[in-house]
Image: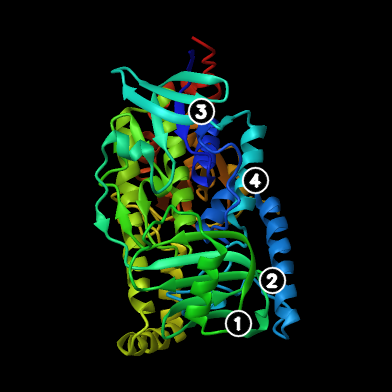
Amino acid sequence: MTRERTDVVVVGAGPTGLLLAIELTLGGADAIVIERLAEPDQTIKAGAIGALAGEALQRRGLAEAMDAVERSMADSMSRLMKSWGGESELPFKKFGGHFSGIFGIDQTRQREPNRRLRGVNQQALEKMLGERAQALGIEIRRGCELIDFEDTGDGMLTRARGASGDVELHSVYLVGCDGGRSAVRKRAGFDFPGTEPTLTGHQAIVDLDHPDRLLPVGWRRTPVGMMAYGPIPGRVFMAEFDGPPADRSAPVTREEIETTLRRISGADVRVTAVKTATRFTDNARQADSYRRGRVLLAGDAAHVHSPFGGQGLNLGLLDAVNLGWKLAAVVCDRMPESLLDSYTAERHPIGARVLANTRAQVALMRPDVMTDALRDIVADLMSGDEGTRYFGEMISGIKTRYDLGSEHASVGRLSGNVALGDDGAETTLFDQMEDGRAVLVDATGGAASAIAARWDIFVRCVSRRAGPSLLIRPDACIAWAAAGEDLAGLDAALMRWFGPAGTCESRSPDEAKRNPGTV
């Protein structure tokens, strides 16, 4: 049996696991990712990522890759719309998402309209994250299944089995990013309370004998349930509210998709081929904590809910960026283990709110006259400026605010991209964050930068003439803010998140980078 050492073992090479490994590496930690599947899963999943997740990728230099995928998706959608005489363009900049299939979220009327969802599907996302991980030298072992793990007292011993045999991985921490049925969560003994499933849903890409019979493109409620056709060619989305599937893990058949589609739509259509299909339900559960000792959870391993509103992928990616830099700082001995307590404290309430709003969306979809009346009221509320902003901010997560103990309205919020630099220098906040460092935006004329200079290995200082001064963590959370020349609390914020100033030089990410080798 091969024995190896690393700082962190990440179980699961989906988007959350890949982004977490990237964040760990940027923070100076070594990570090995193990994945049960030999190849990335091509089953249809999320069709887009939320605004905050898109910003997280932009901060790490993936803006051009996202733009390319978005153009390709827009072209594909446009062809379908034009083929049926609809709009020839589907501008992502105007589409703010939906709530329970009610498309009243107008992105152009949001308080920050440029902070928008991105038309990047999950397969494209995994590809670009995989390429970035490879460029960083991160080891991703596909076809490598978790067998067991244990806390040895001074670290974690993880046993896995791959094509070349069994391996023992000795690490400081283990993170489960292995999905809603997480083996890590179950074996570590996390409580996973929540609500039981009430519906059976399907999503698929199919060929139809008479696709025109499902027009118009878009979402609709029927006497049987909820369905959507398009905007991707051949995509059907269906939900029936008569209980969970008898066997969710059974293969999804062409007959099952066809029968369900005919029943919900009421249309005389035949499914001639199924290119990809999945079955889902609406059980909503959340781990009581995201950490038990040296074992942590992120993404669907920590929380599951229905896919309505497209929030799950956004939620998992934001878990990764919140945890990654903190865990790297701990394993590289730059920060005490207590820093990890902030992960559950900050992310658990966000997950709980998503579970709540997805339950509300299920309630608003039920096919009965009382729900009809309630949907009319909600749609009316969404039509006004405040209503469309309320639902838009809830679905996007833009109003996310971590409780950092500050009364300043900006502290705890996730910063969007802002223009920086003096003397006409063209740079933005996200331009300064590709290497994973924190940023001090200094509007004090240099006084704030003089304080932060003692942490210059971890914090990049950038000046600007107008606006507040901000200390922005690697996950874009605003950790300190002040107007004018007020510097109160800056030193304490730097110490809280990056450790004592006098010792940081010997514990930089580059110098703390491990070369674990083989035992």
- Compute the Cα span from label 2 to label 1: 16 Å
- Disc 4 versus disc 2: distance between alpha carbons? 21 Å
Q: Marks 4 and 1: CB-CB under 8 Å?
A: no
Q: Nearer the viewer, residue 492 or 105?
A: 105
- Callout 2, which amino acid? Met
CA separation in Å, label 2 and label 3 = 38 Å
> Could you tell me which secondary element the residue under label 3 belongs to?
strand
In this view of the protein, can residue 97 be seen by the observer? no
Q: Which residue is mark 3?
A: 31
Percent from the top left, x then y, of residue 189?
26, 37
Q: Amino acid at mark 4?
A: Lys
Query: Which residue does the numbered mark 1 point to in the structure image?
Result: 214
Which mark is first along the chain, 4 or 3?
3
The x and y percentages for residue 242 are 34, 73
Residue at coordinates 44% horizontally, 63% vertically from top-left?
Answer: 307
Q: The residue tagged with tag 1: helix, strand or loop?
A: helix
Q: Write down the residue under mark 2.
A: 77
Contact between labelled residues 1 and 2, with CB atoms less than 8 Å apart: no
Looking at the rendered structure, the kind of residue marked 1 is Leu
Query: Closer to the N terminus: mark 4 or mark 1?
Result: 4
Q: Give above or below for 434 relative to 397.
A: above
Where is 460 relative to 221, above or below?
above
Q: Nearer the viewer, mark 4 or mark 1?
A: 1
Residue placed at 41% from the left, 53% from the top?
A: 482
Q: Is residue 34 left or right of residue 215?
A: left
Cα gap from disc 3 to disc 4, whole angstroms? 19 Å
Q: Nearer the viewer, residue 374 or 118?
A: 374
Q: Quadrant of residue 163?
A: top right
Depth order, front residue of 441/242: 242
Look at discs 1 and 3 and give the one toward the viewer: 1
* Residue tagged 4: 127
Tell me if 354 is positioned left or right of 207 in this view. left
